[in-house]
Structures are given as structure tokens and as C-alpha cells.
Amino acid sequence: MNGRDFSRFRRLVVKVGSSSITHTDGQVHWQKMEHLTRQIADLVHAGREVVLVSSGAVAAGLAPLGFREKPARLEDKQAAAAVGQGILIHRYEKLFRESGIPVGQVLLTRGDYLHPRRYVNARETLQRLLQLGAVPVVNENDTVATDELKVGDNDTLSAMVASIIDADCLLILSDVDGLYTANPQRDPAARLISRVDKITPAMYAAAQGVGSARGTGGMTTKLQAAEICVHSGVHMLIAKADTEHILTRLAAGEEVGTWFVARDVHPQMRKRKLLFGAAMKGKIYVDDGCCAAVLESGSSILPVGIREVEGEFVGGDGVSVYHGKEEIARGIVAFDSAELRRICGVHTADLAAVLGYEPEHNAAVHRNYLVVKS
Ligand code: GLU
């Protein structure tokens, strides 16, 4: 793509850092928050879908709990996040309500990106919120996330969200203008890079030490986020949050900030990464007809084509699909193993009678969640 053709972008993730919506002492900066939400509301009213990833929970929770600065102890930070997240969402809810837009609070951790079942859950919920006209407001679930579970910074989290929902573009609004050729705080000759087609080690070197006082990330986490985005087929842009009407101007095609151009990624590749990196919970053996339909036409797997089910799993788990001794595909299953055993070989029309209820999906593994092994 040449230039920044925003008109094509329908689904956006906007990430805003703590320093862009709080004062230096951590108090929420209502005016900045209002400016941001008004612009998002205009984008939504103009027909775009927007997910907002907002930091600031820890910062907003400091003063109410009597902390003068960001505490070092994990429990203190988690306590501050618990209080601050409520403050943030209350304010976002109020501001978006004035524009007639409902908000949905979504708190995620690393596991929601790594485990197929949780990935699908997060994806479906976020997509449903968007379909229903809401703005999902996402943050890390700081209160329960321990080190192993934590994403740790919202640059990376927002890139994960953009990848989960197949966004067209992630906009990172920060306290820097974008990516520079060198650290602009130290090198007066540093120039803003307006377009990045390839992320290089030199960029990481220049990014070192460029960070903000209140936020968690710096330029390094932004480059890491860009790697996730561009490899997931999502464009990414870094721009300064304080710039007047920044979102409106970007949407109008103005060239501000740094643009990371997405790679052309086939959706199959994303599913492949998801399923071939994860542990499968069981096996389903399919008959000749089903095998041919999967391999030749990329069809969903219907219960009628299943011969046998091995292992214990629940709907949403990853399963391997076998034809005889050969693994032919992997997918995310819609039924629990016990249910699936009861409906092996059963025609779609008879599923309700055998199960005793009308299943939500007829397919045992829907084609959208099925990847053929190459
Ligand atoms: N989740 C953290 C918060 O809301 C922010 C993490 C970050 O600044 O990247 O305070």
C-alpha cells in the first residue's frame, strides 16, 4: 500500500498510554480523556469499529490509596490497578454514553492470546461487542496477572488484541511523535522516520532508553508490538497523543507519526500459528468422505463424518484430526468429548434429538477454526 489510505480501514485498535491520560501525579486528566473519547466517538459514528486499549489503571489508583508514587511491591501495584481500573472505566462509560456509545470492559492476560480456547473466546466476545456497536475498553488484568501470566506492557497487549480481532490498524498514541533515527533526547540530528517497511536491529538500538516517566513501555516495546502487528497483517502507527485532533487527522489521511506497513498475511497462516504452537487435547478420527471434504474443499467437520473420539476435552479446546494413522488437520472443537462421542456418525438433522437440546453449532470443528496440515 502506498501512503496511508485510512479510508480502507474499518477496524481499529487505539492504544493510549498512562502518560497521555493522567497528570504527572497520576490523577486522571479528564480533559485529555474527553478529547480522546470524543474523537473515537466520531470515528464510530462514521462507521468504524474501535477497540480502545487504555493504560492508566495503576496510575489512577495511586492517589486514592495514598501512594505518592508508583510503588515497587507487586501487591501494591495490583491494589492500585484494582482501584484505578474502576475509576477509568467509570469515566470512559460516562464520556462515551454522552455520544450514545456503550463501553464493554475487557481485561486480558497473556493466556488469552496463547491458549486456543481462550483466544477464540476473547475474539468472539470482542467481535460481538463491536457488532453491537460498543467500544470495548481493554486493559491487562493487572490485579490477578502474575509475572508468568503477564503481558507486562500495553503496547504488546494492544498488538495482541489487534491480531486477535484481525484489526486493520493499531494506533499507538504516546508521548513521543514516533520512531526516530536516533534517541531524540540525546541526539539533535535525530530524524522522525515516517514509514517503516522492515524493522531492523538499528531501530532497536536507536530505541534504547527512549521511554516515558509514567508508562511501562518505551520505544522498544513499541517496536516489539510492531513486529506482532506486521506479522499478523495489521498496520501500526505511532503518533503523539497530545497532538490536537490526532485521530481525526489520521483518519483524514494526514501523514503524522511513524507508519509500520503490514505484511500480506493469509488468514490461514494466523490460524496455523495458533494451532501448531499449542498442545492438542484430543483426537478425532474422520471417515473417507469427511477427510476428502476437509482436504479438498476446506469443509467444516460435521459429526456425521466422525468415527471415533479420543481423549477428554471441552468445547473450545484444540484437537487433532486424524484419518487412519495420519494427522490431516488441527482445529478448535465446538463440543465436549463426552457430547461428541454421543453424536459420532449422527446426521445434522438428528443432532438435537440425540443431544436433547438444539446445539449452537452443527459443525464439530468449523472451517474457520480448522487448519489443514501441509
Ligand atoms: N496495565 C497497566 C495500567 O493500566 C499499564 C501498562 C502499561 O503502561 O503499558 O496501569
Image: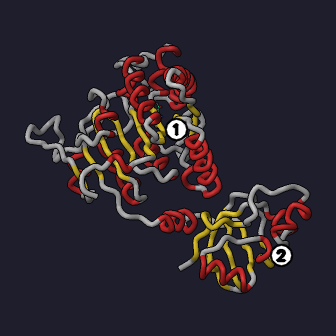
On the image, the x and y values in percent for residue 220 come to 31, 46
Residue 346 higher or lower than 123, as above or below: below
Q: Which residue is mark 2?
A: 345
**CA–CA distance in space, label 1 to label 2:** 43 Å
Residue depicted at x 63% and y 67%: 367
Q: Is residue 298 left or right of residue 239?
A: right
Give the amino acid type for the residue marked by disc 2 in the picture. Answer: Gly
Give the amino acid type for the residue marked by disc 1 in the picture. Answer: Glu
Residue 124 higher or lower than 368, as above or below: above
Name the foreground residue: 55 vs 126. Answer: 126
Residue depicted at x 43% and y 58%: 232
Q: Is residue 373 left or right of residue 252?
A: right
Q: Quadrant of ligand 1?
A: top left
SS at badge 1: strand
Does any atom of ligand 1 lie closer than 8 Å to the CB of label 1? yes
Q: Which residue is mark 1?
A: 140
